[in-house]
Image (cartoon, helix red, strand yellow):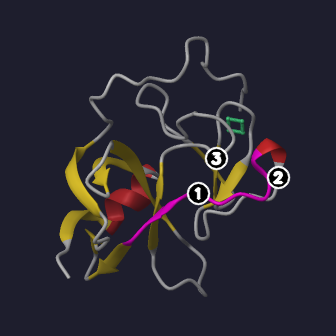
Amino acid sequence: MVRYRLTDIETVREEGVWLFTGRVGGGEEREIIVVPCEDDSADSDVEAWENRCTHEDQRLYREDVGAVVRDGSVVCPKHGSAFDSCSGGCDNGPAAGSTLPSVDVAAEDGQVYLTDDNVSYIHAGPSDDDDDDEPGSTSHLRF
Ligand code: FES
């Protein structure tokens, strides 16, 4: 398996969410978030998910405002559904019953690696593709 070093675990923990852009299945660019998983029963110290809410086409992490991480979950800025950082699952709000598409990552010796054979790394940070969230989709929630 080819693996690509993304960043280190400390950076993910400090920033709460670490964003990169990859290509999934040789197709479109996708933004992917790497998040710390603090659950002791989890297999890994970090997990990675596509940066799209399952309810509507809404980034969970946006470059201008970052992401809202609360109680081990990433919160959608549009309608407030919270996705568990370790499982990607959501049991609340309009996205209840769904799970974020996962991307395989692994933590080893303090480093975080992309290990997903279906995803290739393009660059750190947001996608350059101009498929921005719909106009007026600025955060409707205040935290
Ligand atoms: S767009 Fe995320 S909960 Fe509605």
Using residue 115 as the reference point, say whether residue 62 is left or right of it: right
Badges 3 and 1: C-beta atoms under 8 Å apart? yes
Residue type of the residue flagged with mark 1:
Leu
Q: Where is residue 68 in the image (x, y as percent from the top left)?
A: 60, 42
Measured in 3D between alpha carbons, the distance from the residue under mark 2 to the one under mark 1, in whole angstroms, is 13 Å
Q: Residues within 10 Å of mark 3 (few under 14, many from 20)?
A: many
Q: Which of marks 3 and 1 is nearer the N terminus?
A: 3
The residue range painted magenta reads 95-104
Instruction: Report the mark closest to the observer, 3 or 2.
Output: 3
User: Which quadrant is the N terminus positioned in?
Assistant: bottom left
Magenta-colored segment: predominant secondary structure: loop
Report whether the residue tagged 3 is closer than 8 Å to ligand 1.
yes
User: Which quadrant is the C terminus positioned in?
Assistant: top right
Q: In this view, does 113 lie above or below 31?
A: below
Q: Which of marks 2 and 1 is nearer the N terminus?
A: 2
SS for dot 1: loop
Q: In this view, does 113 lie above or below 122?
A: below
Q: Position of residue 35 (x, y in %)?
A: 47, 60
Q: Which residue is drawn at 53% across and 70% down?
A: 37
Measured in 3D between alpha carbons, the distance from the residue under mark 3 to the one under mark 1, in whole angstroms, is 6 Å
